[in-house]
Amino acid sequence: MLPPAAVFRFPWEVNSVKEGESVRTFGRFLPLFRLVCYQPDESRATLTAQHASKEHPVLVHTQFVEPFNPIIGAQYLVLGETENYEGVGVVVRARVLNCVDGVNIALLQKAVTEQRSFFTERECKQPEEFSKSLL
Amino acid sequence: MDPGEEPPSMLWGLDPIFSAFARLFVSDILQMTESTQVPGIYFYNWHPIYKVDVLGTVVYKRERDDFFCYGVDDGTGVINCLCWKSNLLKEEEDPRTSGAAHSDAALGGFNPVAELKKLRQNQQKRCRLEIGELLRVRGRVKTSRQQREIMASTFYKVDDPMMAVQIAWMMEVPQLYRQFYDKRFQLDAAGSAESSLCKATNLIKDFLKQRLVTKFRPYDVQDLLQPLIAARLQTTATEQEPVAGPSGRQQLSHLLKEVLQVLQNDGVVYRKVKSQDEVYHVTLQDKDLFIAVKDVIREDSRREKYAESGCHVLHILSAVRQRYSLNLTKAALELVLKTLECDSDIVSTSDSHYVAL
């Protein structure tokens, strides 16, 4: 069985998605001296991204992608399902955790926005005609 | 899309997207309707499509003896891709060849066996993907057991450590949609203004040829174009709501003007005298012009200066202009020269020099 499609979500949006939804998001591994980091014994890692002068941490469950080589401070792309835990908040259970250090974050953001605006534009423009052509 | 609305299969090949690998979003590939006329052909927005090009992350894999099955996720959907193993991949490593390769490699120089082994290893690396790696697939869309999948004709792993390829793809695909996939393909898309000019030009040309017209005035041929304008008015009237536009009369004179310009540019007609009275001479029917051109070439070919190399086109043009008509165009002269050469009255010595026989 194929897993559901993982839609791109920005790190600052992950906390607002529905439970069980598949997401792919990106972020930087928090440096060790921060409070949250990669905890191998609990299979839990924290990614963070900066947006609008705020740090947005994303909790990642890494059980499915272990063993992996955590590079502290590097950019990672996570693909997985969201789960909601009481007291902890949203955790992404990673199916894929790729190191993409050096990625042009600004361009990636632009590409994601571009794709989203294309879809909204398409739905607005021809909701009837388009659904008719697909059905 | 109703089955009855499908474009007729005879016209599919005229849609350029039909013969291309369409870079569609996976979600659209999954939702396209299959043709009722020919299974294996799908429609996206009335475009017939049977092969696609996809880039995405592998999120599922299964390996069989003959093929790999990868689930590819491009962020909009997940689709199964059937990737057949090539013979290079299937062959088990033969201990004898590997042993030979080692001994030869030690000698240095080019070793085909070792190179082939390297090639095989490379291919294996490119074809065997793990979950999380990026895959590019091109192939036919197929529906088997009610599941849509891609039968890969080409597939390979893409090394994209900084997501440059993925980002470029994400930026490019919406553009492709806007420019091509989301535009309805219309057979008569190019047939509005441009080809009606073509049609009109051919109509006038045929008329001149059939009737051996030597000269004419615009209003003599104007009526020939009337049916074209009428047809155009009719189609616009049925397709759109009536808009304030040029009247039929204006359109007619405009079209005629364009046609005459094309004919003049081609040298089919020319105006011997530029005056109020708009008279057009048909180049090929102008006997006097032919005589004048022949005379010029014959006389000048005798002169020592031109005897060897022949007269240049521009020289002939200026001579004929002085002698016959100041308004003769180069295109018209070239048409005359071509005809004279076909009749073996003159011979070209280079692509722009002529001598008389």
Image: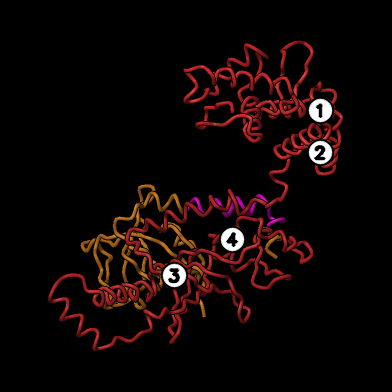
Chain colours: A orange, B red
Q: Which mark is residue B19?
A: 4
Q: Rounded to the nearest whole Å, what is the CA distance between mark 2 and mark 4? A: 32 Å
In the image, taking residue A126 as reference, residue B3 lies left or right, namely right
N-term mark: 1 or 2: 1
Please identify the quadrant where the C terminus of chain B is shown. top right
Residue pointed to by mark 2: B232
The chain to which mark 2 is attached is B
Viewer-side residue, B60 vs B181 = B181
Magenta residues (range): A112-130
Please name which of the two marks, 1 or 3, marks the residue nearer to the observer: 1
Under mark 3, the amino acid is: Phe
Question: Do the CB atoms of the residues marked 2 and 3 lie less than 8 Å apart?
Answer: no
- Magenta highlight: main SS: helix
Write down the quadrant of residue B263 in the picture. top right
In the image, taking residue B273 as reference, residue A4 lies left or right, namely left
Please identify the quadrant where the N terminus of chain B is shown. bottom right
**B143, above or below B276, in the image:** below
Q: Name the residue at the bottom extreme.
A: B95
The answer to whether tags 2 and 4 share a subunit is yes
* Residue at screen point 54% across, 21% down: B301
Write down the quadrant of residue B107 in the picture. bottom left
N-term mark: 2 or 3: 3
Under mark 2, the amino acid is: Arg
